[in-house]
Image (tube, coloured by chain):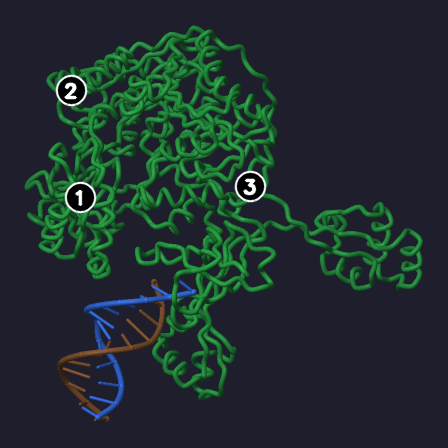
Chain colours: A green, B brown, C blue
Amino acid sequence: MSLLADVIVDVPTLQTNQPYSYKIPDQFAEFIQKGMRVVVPFGKGGRTVQGFVVGFNKESDYSGDLKAIQSLMDNTPVLSDELIALGKDLAYKTFSFRIKCYQTMLPAVLKAKYVRQIHLIDEVDEKILFDLFKGKDSITWEEAEKLKALDLVLKLEKENKVHIDYEVKDKTTTKKVKYLKPLMTFEQLEEEKMSISKNAHKQVLFLNLLQQIAEEELVEVSKFKEYDLSLAQLRTGEKKGWCEIIEKEVLRDPFAAITFETTSPLVLSPDQSAAFEAINESVQSDEHKVFLLKGVTGSGKTEVYLQTISEVIDKGQGALMLVPEIALTPQMVERFKSRFGDQVAVLHSGLSDGEKYDEWRKIEREEAKVVVGARSSIFAPLKHIGLIIIDEEHETTYKQEEFPKYHARDVAIWRGQYHNCPVILGSATPSLESRARASKKVYTLLELKERANNASMPEVKVVDMRDEARNGNRSTFSVTLKEELLKRIEKNEQSVLLLNRRGYSSFVMCRDCGFVLGCPNCDISQTLHMDTKKMKCHYCGHEEQIPRTCPACQSQSIRYYGTGTQKVEEELQELIPHARIIRMDVDTTRKKGAHQKLFKRFEKKEADILLGTQMIAKGLDFPDVTLVGVINADTSLGLPDFRSAEKTFQLLTQVSGRSGRGEKTGEVIVQSFNPDHYAIQLAKHHDYDAFYKKEMNLRRLSDYSPYYFLLKLSVSHEDEMTAAKKIHEFVQFLKPSLSEKAIILGPTPKSIARTHNRYHFQTLIKYKNEEKLKEACHELLQSTQREQAKGLFISIDYQPIDFI
DNA sequence: AGCACGCCGACT
DNA sequence: GTCGGCGTGCTC
């Protein structure tokens, strides 16, 4: 009795979000394994799609004829039993499709590409042969589409003159290096030398070189370039049987050119030892426990991580560590590589798809024991996990904004449970959710109270910008900040300036009539981009010229408003003409490696001031930075987001940590229009505990997280009325499954009500224990499939991060 | 997603 | 009368 394979097919719809049974042809029976990618026929016509084998079954309850698997795409599984189960669970929890989850877990190159090929199978008109097929016997669907000949192709197919073939193409590539292997002995080569013409200098040279290579030795073909021997000349030798050229696969190592000095563990402080001991106990006893490691910046959390990982490796297990993408700096990677050498695999967005795949395979083959990476690394194919670390656990980038909308912290805990291993959540400013769980003893709280080397926390000065304005200073920079910047330049010390970009944009406004240039497709203002000298919509990418006169009143006084990094840089340069400034923002760091280059330049003291957005706030250690300025602390306070105070507090605490990391004491200047706001005042006093208490109280009074869970239902449609009507309908649908305690906010139009010419509405559901809610949401998605197919978008976001 | 089946309008 | 519109339903 042969088995059937359960396959999840690459068709992301609700109707197909389930395993399909396929027969396994005899030739694959021996090789097929759970977790492999396969090519299967699916649906009518000759369509084939990629699928994942998620299990085997003796029989199927499907009444029709079963189809057979067409081919296997892997020699070894790409998904382990653990990841197969995790994907299934994630799909349910995040209201997503299983296939999407599996694709998210794997490197991009493992996602199939589909090619539709049109093959000629019968005689056709000369003209068609020439115009369409250009004399070839097959063309791709896309080529035909470009020639606007798809209807012709379909007609030819009906006439049986062409055949449309569906191919699943594998994108995986491995880097191959050509090696040369001698096949003859010294004596045989000597004989060969006799038999060839003495004028064939290159051939003689080649034979001489071959004689120098030991038997069984492989030499890289590229080495022969040094002797001016081309590949063609080597191939001639291959034809004569002197040698053989073989290709061997090598893994790309993005850090190959860099050598890392090895470092040894540092001596731990009493706080660090206590934390280490507590976590290590869980490691040694294979106990799943979640630790919240709270330590101020510079308190040595990383050293605790490193030493715990070392224990895990000694036990023969692996460790997974997540850091936010922008904190994944060369400095960070270096710390891990220099402690654990080649056992470290690094996954981040700067790698090419091929490089990512190679790092992934290094992990999968168990050549790497330590994985360091951003959000998606939480799915790394480590088989024996002994520890998972989420550094800077409060960062919102751990929540993916696209489907599947998972939170890496939740996945970490899932995997920690599966592997019976501890999970560490580390932060100087833990999220309220995590800190509250620690209070309720769901997590174990570990604290590092002191900075290493007895460094003190920097002094924070808050400058009231309203006073500045009253005193006639309308510039971006307060008098105090300017003076302090000048002092640093004099003393040859460095400063970091942070421009808080959250909720800020530079838009063009008419000073006479107040006209703001908006996007024609979306209800937001367009942003000014000085580098390309264009206006751009950040939502849909629409671009147009910068207006010279106001489109509404023809006034000439239309100009930009708001503060972009570029404008601040210009203003700063004007204010302090001799200051050497490095600006870091999305524009100057777009190119690969630009980020690192700018930091290196700053490190080498080629500049006095580093000016940038959030990306400069993380994990960087510059000993000569003694001043940190926050230009606009409170732009993020005004956002319609219940976490805005928390975000502001975290940001200010974070940047303050950048100052005074060396021997010199540091100073922080925060410019604000709301200097008395508790988030600013408590950040000034480095008082997380007081902030936590105060903020928890506010959250309790306003019924927000962590007291309530949140679920966001969004709906969009081309027609405003339809979208509005539908979301009301859906809320009515969900209501019966909610208890009295649940609170429904909205529905309301989103603050950016229109993008891409679609109208968006959303509603928030606040709840504590609602057993039936998740099931009801799934039902809602199921029952609205028809409407979804007709252009109604519905999205359910469990524990959303943004509300705007 | 992509395809077939099926039931209504305007054409050789 | 039929060709083709896209609404509906299914894919192992």
Disc number for residue A194 = none
Q: Secondary structure at mark 2?
A: loop
**Circle 1 sits on which residue?**
A525
Q: Is the C-beta separation of discs 3 and 1 under 8 Å?
A: no
Q: Secondary structure at mark 1?
A: loop
Q: Chain of mark 2?
A: A
Q: Is residue A410 visible?
A: yes
Disc number for residue A364 = 3
Three-letter code, disc 2: Asn
| Category of crowding for the residue at label 2, using alpha-carbon neighbours closer than 10 angstroms: few (below 14), some (14–19), many (at least 20) | some
Pick the residue in front: A128 or A570: A128
The x and y percentages for residue A156 are 40, 83
Pick the residue in front: A681 or A59: A59
| Category of crowding for the residue at label 3, using alpha-carbon neighbours closer than 10 angstroms: few (below 14), some (14–19), many (at least 20) | some
The x and y percentages for residue A576 are 30, 22
- The residue located at (48%, 11%) in the rendering is A273
The x and y percentages for residue A66 are 45, 66
**Circle 2 sits on which residue?**
A674
Q: Are marks 2 and 3 on the same chain?
A: yes
Three-letter code, disc 1: Ser
Q: Quadrant of residue A557?
A: top left
Q: CA distance from mark 3 to mark 1?
A: 47 Å
- The residue located at (34%, 45%) in the rendering is A404
Q: Quadrant of the C terminus of chain A?
A: top left
Three-letter code, disc 3: Glu
A542 in relation to A558, above or below? below
A239 in relation to A395, above or below? below
Q: Nearer the viewer, mark 2 or mark 3?
A: 3
Q: Chain of mark 3?
A: A
A358 in relation to C6, above or below? above
Going from N to C along the chain, the mark reached first, 3 or 1, is: 3
